[in-house]
Image (cartoon, rainbow, N blue to C red):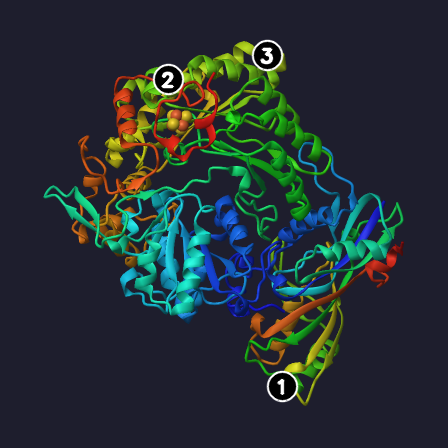
Amino acid sequence: MSKRALPDKILMQVDKSARYIGNELNSVIKDPSEVDVRFAICFPDVYEIGMSHLGIQILYDMFNRRDDVYCERVYSPWTDLDALMREKDIPLFALESQDEVRKFDFLGITLQYEMSYTNCLQILDLSKIPLLANERDESFPLVIGGGPCAYNPEPLAMFFDMFYIGEGEVVYDRLFDLYKEHKHKGYHKKEFLLDAANIPGIYVPELYSVNYNNNGTVNSFFPKHDGIPFKIRKQVLTDMNSASYPVKPVIPYIQAIQDRMTLEILRGCIRGCRFCQAGMIYRPLRERNPEILKEYAKEMFRSTGHEEISLSSLSSSDYTCLKEVVYFLIDEFQGKGVNISLPSLRIDNFSLDVMSKIQDIKKGSITFAPEAGTQRLRNVINKGLTEDDIIGGATECFKGGWSKIKLYFMLGLPTETEDDMKGIPILANELAKAYYDTVPKEERTGKCQITISTSFFVPKPFTPFQWAVMYKPEEYLRRAGIVNDTMKEQLNRKSMKYNWHEAYTSVLEGVLARGDRKVGQAILNAYKSGCMFDSWTDSFDFSKWEKAFSDAGLDMDFYTTREREEGEVFPWDFIDIGVTREFLLKEWHKAMKEEVTPNCRQKCSGCGAAVYKGGVCLEDKG
Amino acid sequence: MKIRVRFSKTGNMKYVGHLDTMRYFQKAVKRAGLDIAYTEGFSPHPVMSFALPLGVGVTSEGEYMDIKVNSSLSSAESVAALNRVMTEGFGVSDYVRLPDDSKTGMTLVFAADYTISVNEEGSFIPPKDIWEGIETKFWQDSETIEAVKKGKHGETLMDIKPLIYFIKSEYNSDNPVRSKLYMRLAAGSRNNLKPDLVIEEGLKFFGLAFDRCDFNIHRTELLNESLVPLKDLGEII
Ligand code: SF4
């Protein structure tokens, strides 16, 4: 029987113990004594969330293709096991070998959302690795962070030895080779980090100094040594077809949140929505070859026998070979017990045809994300979706037999007025009206269902809205109240439902997203006072965070409600994502003027991402 | 064509729950390339039913699922194809064709055989008189065995003696932790007795407390009303 870090006594006590035993289908087993580099890759949240993440599967597969590297997975033990491990002094382990994380060469943590920051500390703490990077000597793993939140790594700078800015496929080989070289000549952490800092995309925070102005903003940011780059350039996979792909994904025993095979059809986005960080940091848009995707799909099915396949992208409709790939999937998989799920599709004749083939219209719903309630505000955010598009699209859906629509909006966007808030339920009412106008009484199976969901807008680094202010939690709730009250005044209110997001979580997310190095102390204080799993409503405790900030001598408002000047140096300005600050500022100005910017395929706006010489930037824009 | 598959679930796989085991096999039959029949509708899944759920923490070499296939290779080839795609801890031992009018394992199952051994991770060392007494004094000599049984409708006090078909004790004097208890208990939808409860009551009878983690519980077979193992109701093809 394979090894197990936890005794029966513990596994019998905790919920979903299959989270902790490893041995899943397609997990990789190697002899640790036969590799040079042991890499623990971690998603700092509970197993079934972490196992749903494509990025980890890509890196896991890629690292393990190297014979000299053994990559194993680590997730946050849920609170029940967390308590038992602390009580019984059991160190955190990786799933495959069940060996202690502490013994690894690297601990790589993916930073997918700000609310997982305290869980990064949980991982270190349970692994018995000192939380502060400068307290860790050669006997501890090198802790490296990556993922979207690494585009502003500063709040976590004190805890990580390195961050990797860019797509994982690009420079990890260089990092491993460098590490091996250092290991063979005698590994000294400081020397290694000095060399690693010269690998493109690698940021070693302790090699940089920050000076602050009296008002608390950043004055300057510079390397402490000669020969260390001033700017960290995002690394991009220019040719998506040359990279490896996890065609043998690890399949968990317990059900993952996203329980399906995933086919990543493209990366990046042409749309340029001004609130969207992914739309900027993953520029330029790059597509995968449809023939390669078809092979991947077949291979994944053979290796998993999965019952669902899904396309992954920021906007599937922008994939030029979408029809070809979707019809292939339908032909290939229908009758083999494989469902096809197609998120982020624009509604048109093609998508309606496809959906009627793959989903049960009576049960299924159609999703629109207008993001803002009025055309004026949609222009501000550069969401190129008009009221006619939405109502026209929905009418087509109703004709096709659907009666459930989900609508997603944000509240608290820059320049938002009461009219914009009220515009949300008014638009929903129009949709309900379109349903009753379109579908004759005798064909209705009941009421139509329009579900409105709003989240609160959180400004993110490297977006045109990085200059935007946030509001106090009470103000967000007031705005949600206006939406709710207005909904109740609508004629078709009985066909509508409204859900809104937690305001306090959004405020904290905003603080961490645009935080600086000083925020690290508050994260540490929060963790020490018991904060963990902050993205889970049940465990989130805003009052602990308020105290954590005041104990660190910090004011949350500085990061949220304060007006930022156009020339302010941001903590993340040392990172170069290709898209220039000038472009972002220009977009910010255009937003204030309610002007839209065409997408990359209509017209190149010269955002700067063309330096990567790939994808949509090279397309002929006839 | 109706097929009955017998499989084992051992080692750490005892922590994979019943629903997850079902999902595991739904995928596995496809990986193995069986010509499986699917249900109708928008989310078709393999036609498949399991005879009796296995509790989390219990291992087994006598699990059953019934499936429907459109065509089939021989039993030996099918067993091999399934075993090629199993993860460690799962294994397929039998693959038999059922008569078209046969009932599902779920409706047929009447009794289950268990082997209880001592978990070496624990500190329990069975005393000889008690271990053997579970067979004799506790089971054979008791007119009734009153126990609180947890069922669908809450807890009920009932006599579980009729649900215990036998208990056989095997004491290992050289190495007491190697001792074993064999038992055959009522199983299925009408009457179902969990082995944990039997051990618990047995120890209680002798004034000992029961800690589930002191024992390994291993299911060895499922049987029908005539006490025939379910696999013997089909034929090897
Ligand atoms: S350079 Fe032009 S085409 Fe390329 S991503 Fe920027 S705007 Fe789009």
Q: What number is the disc on residue A441?
A: 3
- Residue B17 percent location from the top left of the image: 61, 56
**Label 2 CB less than 8 angstroms from ligand 1:** no
* Labels 1 & 2 near each other (Cβ < 8 A): no
Q: Position of residue A567 (x, y in %)?
A: 18, 32
Q: Quadrant of ligand 1?
A: top left
| Residue A562 placement (x, y as % from top left) | 18, 35
Left or right: B52, with A444 as reference point:
right
Return the residue at label 1: B127
Q: Are marks 1 and 2 on the same chain?
A: no
**Do callouts 3 and 2 point to residues on the same chain?**
yes
Whether residue A208 sits left or right of residue A83 in the image: it is: left
Above-or-below relation of A478 to B171: above
Residue A522 visible somewhere in the drawing: yes
Identity, as a three-letter code, of the amino acid under mark 1 = Pro
Q: Secondary structure beneath disc 3?
A: helix
Q: Secondary structure at mark 2?
A: loop
Judging from the image, mark 2 belongs to the subunit labelled: A
